[in-house]
């Protein structure tokens, strides 16, 4: 039985229109549910970085990385286990102002990386960042207060092992 | 297109000329040596067609009767020549009608450049008349696609399209050009694309892997080679033959690998796969080293993966790294072009002799001959067999024809029984199994190799999917020989219904029109044969014709293709009846 694990994919691509379609189609074809996704510029000019988080077996992760890398505009695709990355996710919790002075609630969001982002007459917003588990925990604690809105970002990750993209690009060029 | 712009600025070869986007498309094609295209005009591609009219002395366009016909014709052309086939279609339905052929080309690694018209850029996303998101639709089935919204992008994108379509593992590329980009003007300069920084057409060569593979091959007592289309695409037929002859290894082909090695070669032990030959299928599970060359372990080849060649060390010669370990775990993966890696490995493999092992193939071949092949090629039963029709064609062509087969029982008979003496002689829809492929593909193939005989082998079902392309033959005078093997059934499905669905022939019985009259309506000489004594003469007459010819052969209705590996079964459990 293959062990299902949490993998984070880092995919370096050219900065061209339409790549997301191509990459997401690879997960879709294999019926892999994307847990989270984020896209941003990378450390290299004109090179974008996609970060996908999925729960699959390592054998499948290797195959998916191969399929991702096969795309013309993909420079490299890596996959990492949890212990190979330093990562972050951000969440926003919108709560009615009636709970603002609730001491119990204040204790609940007073963990290391949470703070009040804004306060209005009718609501206040807590911003929290951390691991997926931290955000999940915070969500469970704040939910009883009636979340007016809740949103969380896709994961962004930095790898512990070196990713030699610049070197690879230098070789190609 | 930021990455290409820099390169183009650095290397300009042609002096700038002001032209329209539509004219630039034609100029790009001619720069790439593509002077023949298949297609169907429509509103959103009309500026390009207007240029085709203007360039008619230099550029030849074939009007097919449907866009599907155009793309299959382009596939036929590409498969026999190795050059990218070019297709034009308009937006919306024109573009979507290409999709089946694009998917077919993608899975069979056929180089194509498809150019579709698109609504004007200001209308994009507005559900305008004949607007479809062909980029979105074609993304999963193209090697690359791109939508051009500015005339100035055309030369760079077209150059890139040709480079991607034909380099590395070839495939289909689709370029969608908005109508305003076709009307727009640009200073035309052309530089062929030779590199894309994110695209590695050929993976890094590793001499250590060559040495590891050679060691395994040299130590093998019972090696078996399974080769695929990679040998043909890589133009490595001679290198392949030298390799198998030096190592004396029995070699079997996939469907798409057929014709890379002549059928009669003493080391050619037939075809593997669901309807392949008995010996190479059974002995896949006896060999000690399995050497896969330019093939991708398709499920129709491997049968049940849990029991496929588990005893063997597996060596995989492959250009596409994503194919390595995808279906079958390999012990040694030799990445690169087959042409390069086979040349390299020749230095390390020893001259060997596997006569005793070869005898095992001969024994099983005799069993297959006794139980299947003889009955097919020299039947005693009253009805004509598909095998004897192929045998008759072999006799008249001496194996020198390009055989274009459609999809179904007749396809498997064609692959099993057609003799090949030259490479690029077997054109069929392998991975996608597209019925309706053969008639238009044979038109393209004939245009690709006009001096060769092109014989299309088609079933009565597939023929009726694209028989409108008889109109293309009427107009172009493409001298293809069309053989319809008519059993009044969708034969392959009927065979499965017989074997696995208790003979419940649900919607597989087919009533067809008078095919001879239909061919006559298109001014194509035709005849029908239903008696054995008339077959040889009919084939002779067909092959003697200098023009297109249609031959309908009424064959036994419930003939089956054997051997057969039922879905999910092991290759060594192949059935002879």
Image: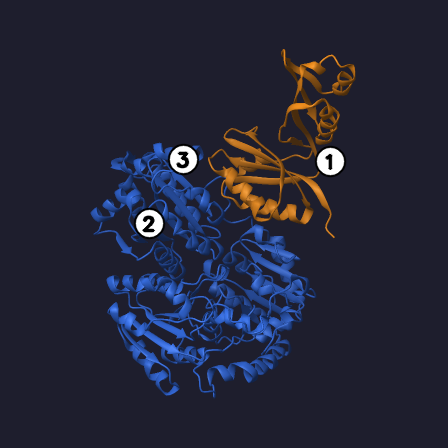
Residue B405: tell me if it is visible: no
Visual hue assigned to chain A: orange
Mark 3 vs 2, N-terminal side: 2
Are the residues flagged by discs 3 and 2 in contact, CB closer than 8 Å? no
x 52%, y 38%: residue: A20
* Front: mark 3 or 1: 3
Q: Chain of mark 2?
A: B
Disc 3 is placed on an element classified as loop
Visual hue assigned to chain B: blue
Residue A74: tell me if it is visible: yes
x 35%, y 38%: residue: B128
Given residues B43 and B249, the one toward you in this image is B43
Characterize the local packing of mark 2: few (<14), some (14-19) or many (20 or more) Cα atoms within 10 angstroms. Answer: many
State how far apart marks 1 and 2 are (Cα).
Answer: 51 Å
Given residues B521 and B74, the one toward you in this image is B521
B15 sits left or right of A61 in the view: left
Characterize the local packing of mark 3: few (<14), some (14-19) or many (20 or more) Cα atoms within 10 angstroms. Answer: few
* Front: mark 3 or 2: 3
Q: Position of residue B449 (x, y in %)?
A: 33, 64
Q: Which residue is under mark 3?
A: B125
Q: Position of residue B528 (x, y in %)?
A: 33, 78
Q: Which residue is under mark 1?
A: A83
Q: Position of residue B417 (x, y in %)?
A: 47, 76
Given residues B126 and B192, the one toward you in this image is B126
């Amino acid at each position: 039985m293959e062990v299902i694990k949490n993998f984070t994919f880092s995919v370096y691509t050219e900065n061209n229109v339409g790549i997301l379609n191509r990459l997401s189609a690879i997960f879709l074809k294999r019926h892999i549910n994307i847990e989270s996704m984020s896209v941003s510029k990378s450390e290299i000019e004109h090179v974008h970085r996609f970060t996908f988080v999925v729960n699959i077996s390592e054998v499948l992760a290797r195959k998916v990385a191969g399929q991702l890398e096969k795309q013309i505009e993909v420079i490299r695709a890596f996959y990492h286990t949890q212990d190979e990355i330093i990562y972050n996710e951000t969440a926003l919790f919108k709560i009615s102002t009636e709970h603002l002075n609730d001491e119990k609630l204040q204790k609940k969001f007073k963990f290391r990386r949470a703070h009040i982002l804004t306060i209005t007459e009718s609501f206040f917003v807590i911003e929290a960042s951390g691991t997926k588990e931290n955000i999940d925990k915070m969500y469970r604690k704040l939910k009883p207060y009636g979340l007016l809105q809740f949103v969380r970002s896709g994961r962004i990750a930095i790898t512990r092992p070196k990713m030699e993209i610049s070197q690879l690009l230098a070789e190609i060029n | 297109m930021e990455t290409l712009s820099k390169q183009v600025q650095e290397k300009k070869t042609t002096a700038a000329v002001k032209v329209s986007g539509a004219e630039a498309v034609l100029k790009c094609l001619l720069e790439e040596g593509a002077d023949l295209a298949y297609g169907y005009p429509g509103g959103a591609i009309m500026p390009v067609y207007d240029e085709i009219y203007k360039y008619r002395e230099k550029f030849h366009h074939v009007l097919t009767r449907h866009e599907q016909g155009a793309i299959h014709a382009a596939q036929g052309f590409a498969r026999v020549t190795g050059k990218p086939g070019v297709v034009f279609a308009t937006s919306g339905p024109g573009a979507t009608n290409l999709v089946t052929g694009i998917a077919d080309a993608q899975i069979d690694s056929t180089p194509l450049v498809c150019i579709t018209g698109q609504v004007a850029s200001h209308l994009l996303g507005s559900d305008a008349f004949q607007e479809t998101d062909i980029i979105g639709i074609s993304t999963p089935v193209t090697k690359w696609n791109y939508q051009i919204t500015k005339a100035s992008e055309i030369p760079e994108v077209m150059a890139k399209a040709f480079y991607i379509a034909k380099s590395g593992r070839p495939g289909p590329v689709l370029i969608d050009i908005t109508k305003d980009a076709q009307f727009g003007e640009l200073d035309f300069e052309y530089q062929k694309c030779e590199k894309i920084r994110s695209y590695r057409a050929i993976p890094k060569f590793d001499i250590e892997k060559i040495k590891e593979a050679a060691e395994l091959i040299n130590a093998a007592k019972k090696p078996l080679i399974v080769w695929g289309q990679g040998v043909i695409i890589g133009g490595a037929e001679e290198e392949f033959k030298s390799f198998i002859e030096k190592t004396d290894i029995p070699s079997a082909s996939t469907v798409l690998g057929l014709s890379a090695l002549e059928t009669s070669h003493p080391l050619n032990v037939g075809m593997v796969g669901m309807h392949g030959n008995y010996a190479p299928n059974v002995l896949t599970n006896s060999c000690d080293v399995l050497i896969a060359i330019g093939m991708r372990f398709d499920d129709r080849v491997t049968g049940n993966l849990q029991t496929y060649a588990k005893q063997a060390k597996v060596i995989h010669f492959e250009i596409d790294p994503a194919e390595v370990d995808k279906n079958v775990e390999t012990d040694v993966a030799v990445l690169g072009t087959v042409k390069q890696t086979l040349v390299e490995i020749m230095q390390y493999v020893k001259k060997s002799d596997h006569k005793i092992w070869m005898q095992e193939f001969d024994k099983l071949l005799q069993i297959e001959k006794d139980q299947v092949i003889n009955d097919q090629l020299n039947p005693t039963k009253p009805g004509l067999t598909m095998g004897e029709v192929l045998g008759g064609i072999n006799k008249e062509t001496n194996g020198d024809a390009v055989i274009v087969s459609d999809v179904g029982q007749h396809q498997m008979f064609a692959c099993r029984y057609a003799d090949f003496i030259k490479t690029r002689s077997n054109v069929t829809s392998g991975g996608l199994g597209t019925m309706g492929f053969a008639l238009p593909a044979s038109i393209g193939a004939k245009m690709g190799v006009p001096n060769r005989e092109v014989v299309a082998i088609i079933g009565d079902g597939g023929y009726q999917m694209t028989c409108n392309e008889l109109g293309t033959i009427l107009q172009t005078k493409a001298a293809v020989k069309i053989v319809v093997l008519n059993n009044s059934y969708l034969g392959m499905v009927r065979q499965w219904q017989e074997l696995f669905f208790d003979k419940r022939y649900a919607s597989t019985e087919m009533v067809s029109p008078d095919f001879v009259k239909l061919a006559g309506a298109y001014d194509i000489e035709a005849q029908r044969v239903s008696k054995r004594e008339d077959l040889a003469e009919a084939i002779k007459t067909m092959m003697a014709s200098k023009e297109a010819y249609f031959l309908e052969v009424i064959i036994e209705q419930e003939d089956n293709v054997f051997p057969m590996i039922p879905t999910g079964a092991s290759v060594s459990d192949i059935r002879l009846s």
